Structure formats: structure tokens, C-alpha cells
Image (tube, grey):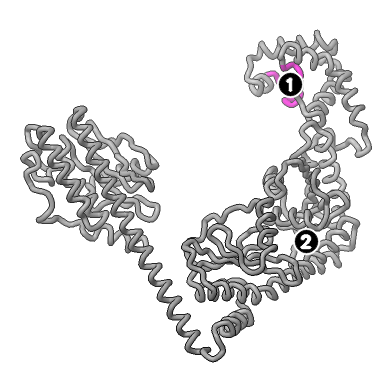
């Protein structure tokens, strides 16, 4: 497609006998690309006259390629310029003009793409002045004109060049707009003709039964064909001539047939989604919301999804509404079947995870995992999820499952009284699952704990405790929301679940209290310096480098720490207690503040 369009854009790029007069300042236009230059520059009035003539010719040009060719041929009318190269934006790429010079083609092309839509200088040997000038319209960048000069242009010549660029960009905008209108008109005409032909065919075949029975039989046949949601939307699009789509209960796209599909598809807002569903549910039949005609798929009162037509031109009539209703009825059994399968699969997953967390024999677990299409032979991580404003019910478990799938996690899922548990076959990303759940729930008040890797199914109960421990540590930290990995807890991994956090605070206050108070009063960082000193194993150079201070400054701070705290870093017991205290201060109590 891109190649054929490039050919169309440039099919008129050949020397013409017509076009503008040859008398532009006494020079033929082809002198703009390296021919002999006249000894004197054209007077401004004469140059303006030629630019006006060029503008008229460009607006009369048949296509974008001809507009760019005219600008390149007559750049000399604006001053002592040469048209080094021209580019048109086609299909998201900058396509060079066939009239571009070959000597510096690669270097100039690379420089133009580096500018990413901005104007900028271009270096060409033998030309002391060169600029890449963007040809822009209201829709954005249309292309580039690369201009060079053997002498630096005057202010008046720069103004003439800017005027030429503006006129060329305006002509390109008009040409692009005309092209889009022609393409849209052709597509609209095709859809209307297709719709008219199909309606005539249906009416002729089932004249005695009537249009309603014909549509019912047609949609029933589509549903029975086993094509699923895509077959239904495809049939609905053919019947109505309008884009047809299916979304799930939460607003995520499942199928779209027809033009103008948004890419990417908009992320649903849970609150607005619920409001929309309730508004449609209160009405009988399809409901128009903005440019969409919407009906719910809800067998036995349970909403399983949404079927809609995009009707921006308000073309829907009673036949369109009838087709939409029959399509929804034919789709209901399919979505019910998929829901039932999902519930069975989810129940099997939960039973398997419950047994893994409690401890089960490996042979049975492997057999059951294969039955549900999950590989338990890989290394696994146990992930525990808790959200302060959400009960760990089936709805929240489904939310966690969707978020995990969205970030690429392959996992089995179950739930407990106050949290959801995932058994994942890879180490989760540090932030992806938390951010996905924050979007799903509309709040960031959640905590996630991740265990160390498990190489054996027998170890999963132990790693489940690790994940709970990581979550518990995070919940009792000052920064209580986010993701914590058990294998990153360091010293705190050895502390049991029953420890009193007030005891930890007392311990930190006993060993670091004076330093913390000093830092608070003087806006200093002695505790952070001490923590970094221990992290670097007592190495002066590494510590100074990590703090971005001089070695002598580090010595001074360590001496101040000795003086203020009364503890000797050379004493083994003092050193151990201070190191433990800085670790607890950083990991459990949240560090500075």
C-alpha cells in the first residue's frame, strides 16, 4: 500500500514544458538545483510576483508530488537558494523526492529524520548555509524542503523563503484534505452500495416471511456456525453498514468489525462504566450514548457484555435496531457458554492452588496442572495481594486475575479471607502488577508481597509464608503501599511474624536516637551516612563516592557520629548494633523522615 501511494504521489515528477515562466529573475527554475546562477539577485517586487505565481500553480496542482516539485524547481525565486532535497510524509514515513540530489542523499535524509518534525540546520559540502524546513499544516507535518545557499541569505531573502514554505505547506494541506475526502467518499459509497445490495437480497429471498424473520434466521445461522463473537459482529456490520463491536462487562474490547477502530482502544473507567451499564439496563431495547447504539447481553438478568454499533452519522433506522437486538440474542448463548467454562476453569485453578498452599503430592499436582493447561515444572513465586478498600471476594479475585494477565503474568489464583494469592511461573515486575491494580481499583491503597523463588512444589507452603511476611513488613512500614519482595528484606527476613514493631522502634531509638534528633535539628544526614558506610562494608572510598562527598568530609561525619552517639565504630558490639539499627531504620521504619 505504501509503495503504491508513493508511486501515485510522485507519478507527475517529470520535467514539464508547462508550469511557471522561465523568466524568474532572468533564470530558468532548474538553476535551483545546481545550474549556473545569475550574477545579481532578483528584486524583491519581482520575487514576490513570482512567488504569487508559484502559489497559484501549486494550488492548481493535481497532487502532492507536483506541489513539492514546483517548490523545488522555483526555490531560486526566493533568493540565492538551491533545493537540495524534498520529502513527503507518506504512511508515517518521510519519502524522498525523485528529484533529490544523489551525492548527499543518505546524509541529508538521515539528518532530516533526526529532526523529528522540527526545523534545523543541514550541512552540505560546498554550501555554507543549509536548512531543513518543515512543511506543516493543521494536521501536522506534511514533509520537508531542504534548502542550501552558497552565501548567507539576507533578512529579506529569508522572509521570501519562509513565505514560499508557508504557501507550499498550505497547498499540501489542501491536497491532503482533498485526497482524504475522496477516499472517505469512496469508502462511504462502497459501504452504502454493499448495504443496499444485501438488504435487497434479503427482502427478495424472504419476502413472504418479512424482514424480521429473515434477520432472525440469518443471525441464528451465524451463531450456529461456531464463529463466535467475531462472526456475529461481522454479520451485524454487513447488515447495517456500521462498525459493530463487542465489549466485556468491564469495557474491554473483544471484537470489532468495520472501519475507524480506535488504536489503542480506550482504557475503561470503572465508575463511568457502571453508570453507563445501569443507565442502559433501565431502558427497553438499544440505547444511544453519544455516537453509539448500545444493547446489553444479559441472559437471565446477568450482564455478560455489551454489543454496540458506531453510528456517528445518526443513520440507524428500525431495521438497524432490529438487527442489533437479534445479534445480541444470538450472542447471549455464546457468552454464557464462555462464562461457564471460565467459572469451571477458575474453580479448578483455585482448588489446585489451595492444595499447593496446604501441601499436596507432586504427582497429583502435576497431573491436575496439565489438565488446566498450566506448567508446574517451572520455578514459581507466591504472590499475596491485599487492598485496604476491597474485600477479598470473587469480584476482587477476578480483578487481580485480569490485572495479572494484562501485565503478562502466567499464574494460578485463589483467595483467602483478606487477600488474594497467585502462584506465578516467573518473578513479577517490581511495579507492573501494583500499577495495573491501582488503575483497576481506582486507588493506590494496596500492598503486594512476593516470596523467594520456589524450585519444588513441596516448598510452596513455606514460600506462601514468605510472601505473607513480605506483605506484613510492607504494611507496617511508613511507606505501606506497593510491592515488597521477601528476598530483598535483608536482615528483616529473620524476624518472625509476631514481633512487636514498637520494640523495633525502641531499639532504633536506643542506638540512633541522638543522631536522628541531630539530623532533624540541623537538616543533616548523619544516619544516612552511617547506613551507607555499613552498606559499603566500611570502605571509605566507596562510601564517599556513593554519597558524592569528599573522603575528608566522610571522615569528619564519622567522627561527629562517634561524638554525638557516644558509640565506637571500632568496637565489635557497637558496630553490630549500629548496623542492625540502620537496617531496621531503613527497611522497617521507612528511612529518613
**Residue 114 visible from this viewpoint:** no
Mark drawn on residue 528: 1
102 in relation to 501, above or below: below
Q: Position of residue 319 (x, y in %)?
A: 53, 76
User: Mark 1 or mark 2: which comes first in sequence?
Assistant: 2
Secondary structure mostly seen in magenta is: helix
Spot occupied by residue 332 in the image (x, y as percentages of width and height): 68, 73
Residue at label 2?
376
Image quadrant containing the C terminus: top right
Q: Residue at x 23, y 38 (%)?
A: 163
Name the secondary structure under disc 2: loop
Residue drawn at 54 percent across, 55 percent down: 264
Q: Nearer the viewer, mark 1 or mark 2?
A: 1
Could you say which quadrant of the image residue 137 lies in? top left
The quarter of the picture where the N terminus appears is bottom left
Lateral position of residue 432 relative to residue 176, left or right: right
Report the front residue among 556 and 299.
299
Dividing the picture into quadrants, the one containing residue 337 is bottom right
Tag of residue 240? none
The vertical placement of 580 against 471, above or below, is: above
Task: Decide whether residue 286 is among the magenta residues.
Answer: no
Q: Which residues are magenta?
A: 525-540
Amino acid at each position: 500500500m505504501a509503495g503504491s501511494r508513493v508511486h501515485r504521489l510522485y507519478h507527475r515528477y517529470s520535467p514539464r514544458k508547462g508550469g511557471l515562466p522561465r523568466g524568474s529573475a532572468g533564470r530558468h527554475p532548474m538553476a535551483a538545483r545546481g545550474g549556473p546562477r545569475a550574477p545579481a539577485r532578483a528584486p524583491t517586487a519581482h520575487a514576490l510576483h513570482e512567488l504569487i505565481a508559484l502559489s497559484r500553480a501549486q494550488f492548481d496542482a493535481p497532487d502532492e508530488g507536483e506541489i513539492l516539485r514546483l517548490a523545488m524547481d522555483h526555490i531560486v525565486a526566493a533568493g540565492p537558494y538551491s533545493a537540495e532535497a524534498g520529502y513527503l510524509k507518506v504512511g508515517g514515513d518521510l519519502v524522498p523526492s525523485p528529484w533529490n540530489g544523489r551525492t548527499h542523499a543518505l546524509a541529508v535524509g538521515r539528518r532530516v529524520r533526526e529532526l523529528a518534525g522540527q526545523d534545523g540546520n543541514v550541512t552540505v559540502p560546498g554550501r555554507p548555509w543549509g536548512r531543513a524546513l518543515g512543511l506543516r499544516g493543521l494536521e501536522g507535518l506534511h514533509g520537508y524542503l531542504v534548502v542550501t545557499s552558497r552565501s548567507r541569505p539576507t533578512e529579506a531573502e529569508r522572509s521570501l523563503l519562509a513565505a514560499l514554505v508557508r504557501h507550499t505547506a498550505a497547498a499540501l494541506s489542501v491536497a491532503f484534505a482533498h485526497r482524504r475526502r475522496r477516499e472517505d467518499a469512496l469508502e462511504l459509497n462502497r459501504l452504502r452500495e454493499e448495504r443496499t445490495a444485501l438488504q435487497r437480497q434479503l427482502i427478495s429471498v424472504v419476502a413472504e416471511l418479512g424482514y424480521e424473520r429473515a434477520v432472525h434466521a440469518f443471525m441464528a445461522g451465524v451463531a450456529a456456525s461456531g464463529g463466535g463473537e467475531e462472526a456475529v459482529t461481522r454479520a451485524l456490520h454487513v447488515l447495517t453498514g456500521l462498525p459493530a463491536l463487542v465489549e466485556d462487562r468491564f469495557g474491554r474490547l473483544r471484537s470489532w468489525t468495520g472501519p475507524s477502530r480506535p488504536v489503542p482502544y480506550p482504557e475503561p473507567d470503572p465508575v463511568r462504566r457502571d453508570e453507563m451499564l445501569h443507565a442502559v439496563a433501565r431502558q427497553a431495547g438499544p440505547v444511544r450514548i453519544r455516537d453509539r447504539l448500545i444493547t446489553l447481553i444479559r441472559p437471565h438478568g446477568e450482564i455478560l457484555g455489551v454489543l454496540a454499533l458506531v453510528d456517528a452519522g445518526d443513520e440507524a433506522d428500525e431495521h438497524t435496531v432490529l438487527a442489533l437486538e437479534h445479534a445480541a440474542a444470538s450472542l447471549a448463548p455464546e457468552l454464557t457458554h464462555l462464562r461457564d467454562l471460565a467459572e469451571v476453569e477458575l474453580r479448578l485453578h483455585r482448588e489446585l492452588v489451595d492444595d499447593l498452599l496446604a501441601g499436596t503430592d507432586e504427582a497429583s499436582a502435576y497431573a491436575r496442572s496439565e489438565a488446566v493447561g498450566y506448567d508446574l515444572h517451572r520455578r514459581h513465586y507466591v504472590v499475596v495481594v491485599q487492598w485496604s478498600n476491597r474485600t477479598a471476594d470473587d469480584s476482587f479475585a477476578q480483578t487481580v486475575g485480569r490485572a495479572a494477565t494484562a501485565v503478562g503474568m502466567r499464574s494460578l489464583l485463589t483467595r483467602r479471607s483478606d487477600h488474594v494469592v497467585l502462584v506465578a511461573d516467573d518473578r513479577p515486575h517490581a511495579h507492573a502488577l501494583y500499577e495495573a491494580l491501582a488503575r483497576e481499583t481506582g486507588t493506590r491503597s494496596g500492598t503486594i508481597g512476593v516470596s523467594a523463588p520456589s524450585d519444588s512444589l513441596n516448598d510452596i507452603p513455606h514460600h506462601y509464608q514468605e510472601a505473607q511476611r513480605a506483605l506484613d513488613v510492607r504494611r507496617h512500614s511508613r511507606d505501606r503501599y506497593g510491592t515488597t519482595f521477601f528476598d530483598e528484606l535483608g536482615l528483616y527476613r529473620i524476624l518472625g511474624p509476631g514481633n512487636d514493631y514498637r520494640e523495633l522502634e525502641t531499639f532504633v531509638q536506643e542506638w540512633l536516637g541522638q543522631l536522628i534528633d541531630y539530623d532533624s535539628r540541623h537538616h543533616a544526614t548523619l544516619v544516612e551516612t552511617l547506613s551507607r558506610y555499613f552498606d559499603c562494608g566500611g570502605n571509605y572510598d566507596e562510601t564517599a563516592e556513593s554519597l558524592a562527598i569528599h573522603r575528608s568530609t566522610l571522615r569528619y561525619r564519622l567522627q561527629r557520629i562517634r561524638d554525638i552517639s557516644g558509640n565506637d565504630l571500632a568496637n565489635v558490639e557497637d558496630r553490630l548494633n549500629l548496623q542492625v539499627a540502620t537496617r531496621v531504620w531503613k527497611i522497617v521504619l521507612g528511612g529518613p523522615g
